[in-house]
Image (cartoon, rainbow, N blue to C red):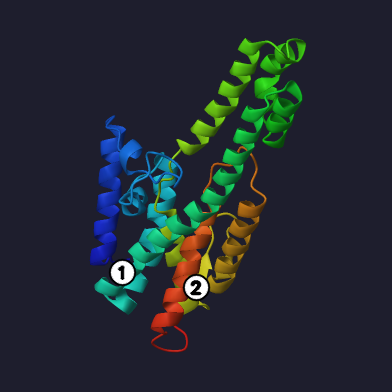
Amino acid sequence: MNLTPVVRTLLLVNVGFFIVKALGIDLISTFGLYSFLSPAFAPHQFVTYMFLHADFGHIFSNMLGLFFFGPMLEQVWGSKRFTTFYFITGVGAGLLFLGINYFEASQLRDAVAAFQSNPTPESLELFLSDRGLLSQGDNFLRVFEDNPTDPSYRRGAVQLVQTYYDQQLSVPMVGASGAIFGILMAFGLLFPNTELFLLFPPIPIKAKYLVAFYGAYELYSGIYRAQSDNVAHFAHIGGMLFAFILVKYWGKQRNNFY
């Protein structure tokens, strides 16, 4: 497969940033995408976050998707439109993710404030239980239950909950996944009947069915996200959603491509 100019540039830039990060230079704290409620949030992060990746597996899977699906879209649209598409879907993914995150973080902020106004062992147990944290805070909770009116333990409980809230806001999102899922959506819309051969399991599947499966999986995983799941599923959905809107807005050059 011949690499198109923009796809080649995106691959090089992403790999370049990954190498810089691997050398020990901290890029994520400045260029990762933080929650709207975090003091570390800055508007430029909507663009910069998509060029950073957490580890080798993260960048490999994203760049593999860009390598296989990006060139055909760039050939159909041209470099300028493909570049526009890539950044709009990437930024759109970040917007949807932060929108959902703002709702969740606001609920957490209110729960923290409610607890801190009346820090009791019972309310601490409820707070920890709702977030699957009982095993982590069990030792402190037991001591707090034995000393419910002790000011030092009440302060400790308040600090424990505040620390958890601060930690949730201090984790930025990184990765090109939103834009890559946008590319996958566009590929499925423009080349719906193109057969792709999966590696696991090794079977052929039409692009439209692969896209439908991924979309359904990401939506389910986002709604029923496990406590230990650190994948930004709603960023993936955001990329697909903005891709769908763009492709429909621009119109297809012919009914179907094969």
Q: Residue at x 25, y 51 (%)?
A: 13
> Where is residue 183, by image quadrant?
bottom left
Can you tell which mark lies on residue 188?
2
Q: Name the amino acid, label 1.
A: Thr
Residue 33 pos. (x, y %): 39, 46
Residue depicted at x 34% and y 36%: 29
- Circle 1 Cα neighbour tier, 10 Å, few/some/many (<14 / 14–19 / ≥20): few
Tell me the residue that label 1 is attached to.
84
Residue at the limit of the structure toward the bottom, as seen here: 254
- Per the image, label 2 sits on a secondary structure element best described as helix
- Residue type at tag 2: Gly
- Comparing 79 with 37, the one in front is 37
Q: Position of residue 4 (x, y in %)?
A: 26, 67
Horizontally, residue 79 falls left or right of residue 234, namely left
97 over 83 or under it: above or below:
above
Question: Furthest residue to the front?
Answer: 117
Between 44 and 69, the one lying in front of the other is 44
Q: Residue at x 50, y 73 (%)?
A: 188
Residue 219 can be seen, yes or no: yes
Q: Residues within 10 Å of mark 2 (few under 14, many from 20)?
A: many
Would you say the residues marked 1 and 2 are in contact, meaning their CB atoms lie under 8 Å apart? no
Residue at 76% over, 15% down: 145
Q: Is residue 7 left or right of residue 200?
A: left
Foreground pick, 226 / 199 = 226
User: Does label 1 or label 2 sit earlier along the sequence?
Assistant: 1
Helix, strand or loop at mark 1: helix
